[in-house]
Amino acid sequence: MQVSRQQRRDLSFSMKASPYYQKTSRITTVLRWITIILIIFAIVCGAGASFYLTQHRKWDWIFVGDVADAIVYHANSLLDREDLFDVSLQSSSSIREFNETNLSYFSNEELAKLGILNLPENFQIQDTYKGIRFVRTAQKSFSEIQLGLLKYFIDITPTRLLNPGPTAIVTYAPGEIANVANLNDRTAAFASGSYMFFNDHSFNPVYPLADTSVDAAFRTFIHELVHVAQFNYIVDRLDPASIDEFYKEGLSWIDLVVNSQLIAEFALYAGWQVYSEGSKLLYKLPNSVLAQTSEYGKSKIYEDMAESVAAFVTTNTVGFSGDRLKWCVQFLGDSDIQVKLHKFPVPFNMQSVNITNPSYDKNKESSMKQRYKYLDIQYFITEDVNVINDIQYFLSEELSQRGWKGTFTRYRDQNGVVYIKGDFDGTYRDLYLELYTYDHAHGFLVKPRGTIMVVMSGYLLKD
Ligand SMILES: [Zn+2]
């Protein structure tokens, strides 16, 4: 039966007129609203849960290691318009001769057009280790200790960053390299193309509150090596015939790096947003994810990459997002596994600090100074209480897994201060560790909270 609109209205009117209907009507209205609210709630929860799951499953899947195709696909769609390199895929290093006069695959003129520094005149190769040249200038050479430390760094660096690595690691005196933007007296290290530049600050920074440990210098070393890897990535795709074109367009090697697929892939993990300005791609880190990298990492996407890898390799990753570290796993691949063995395992909840007037065994310090070519002392602290046993357990396990041999001894002094000390012998670096806590100490008006760790490292450097 067909009911017209008018009939329906009449029908409902007559039904509403009965008192029975009025009662059920109120109940059904309430029930109807409850149903609607429940349905909306279910939709919102379902959408939230599936979003959460897709995010997490995506990363689980990536972590398994099958990421390349998906990421390259996304990166391609990101860069389809403007990728400057994939249109001229040629390997400069395979089609060009290595130029012994400037330790590069390019001429000095080409380097200058790409915005890369020329080596100082009258440079000399001071030493070579595992194929890497250490270069001195007329006024400045590396000290014995610096050469020993650089060789140690090369030994413990993931091979991905050394194949190919820098074509020269250069030291210089102030004023010998004057014509570089942003280079000042305080510059500790920098990379330009396939050259890395180190001066005395690199090993003993002059910044206030600088951490002068070898670990900090190694972190700088890895940071600069990442810039070299960024350059090597574009060299493999850079047709030397197009250098003039890039020069006319005002594109330096840094711009080419920023336009590369390597950077596009990193951007996807780290949350940088891409936009373009003329033929340049630029990246911006949205405010919502600013806090996922170091202060310096926030400044430029290629610095973020260098900071993230340096943090990952030195296993000192507090403040970096998990997605960045996953990208590092992907980028370094298996090459990081064997070298991790020789790195000091900083307990996850401890922060590196400078302590004035630290309490540690001064006799031990002077005897170690005699025994090793180079010794440094680092301090770490956690304000978590009652964790000294966990830290001792963590270090015992990790040190033995990483090839260090030794044991801890433990005692409590008359004031209830707990000390845990140990000597550990390693392949490149011997350790003396001292942990102490005032957690259960008595008789102090003021006492530090948590656990303090002193790490003395004696380096067994090569000649
Ligand atoms: Zn940098």
Image (cartoon, rainbow, N blue to C red):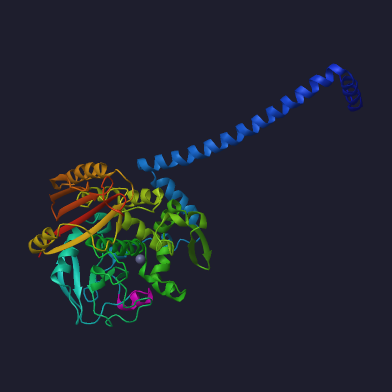
Q: Which of 266 and 372 is in front in this view?
A: 372
Left of 117 or right of it: where is 456?
left
Q: What stretch is highlighted in magenta?
A: 107-116
Q: In which quarter of the image is residue 59?
A: top left
Residue 241 appears in the picture as rendered: yes
Give percent across and percent down for residue 174. 27, 80
| In-image side of 71 versus 388 (left or right) | right
Residue 226 percent across, percent down from the top left: 32, 61
- Residue 259 picture quarter: bottom left
Magenta part, dominant SS? helix
Residue occupying image coordinates x 26% and y 82%? 176
Q: Does the magenta stretch include residue 408?
A: no
Q: Where is residue 75 in the image (x, y as percent from the top left)?
A: 45, 53
Let me know if residue 199 appears in the view: no
- Viewport quadrant of the C terminus: bottom left
Q: 214 or 416, which lies in front?
A: 416
User: Which image quarter is the N terminus in?
Assistant: top right
Q: In which quarter of the image is ligand 1?
A: bottom left
Place of residue 353 in the rendered image (x, y in percent of width and height, measured from the top left): 30, 59
Please say whether residue 112 is one of the residues in the magenta stretch: yes
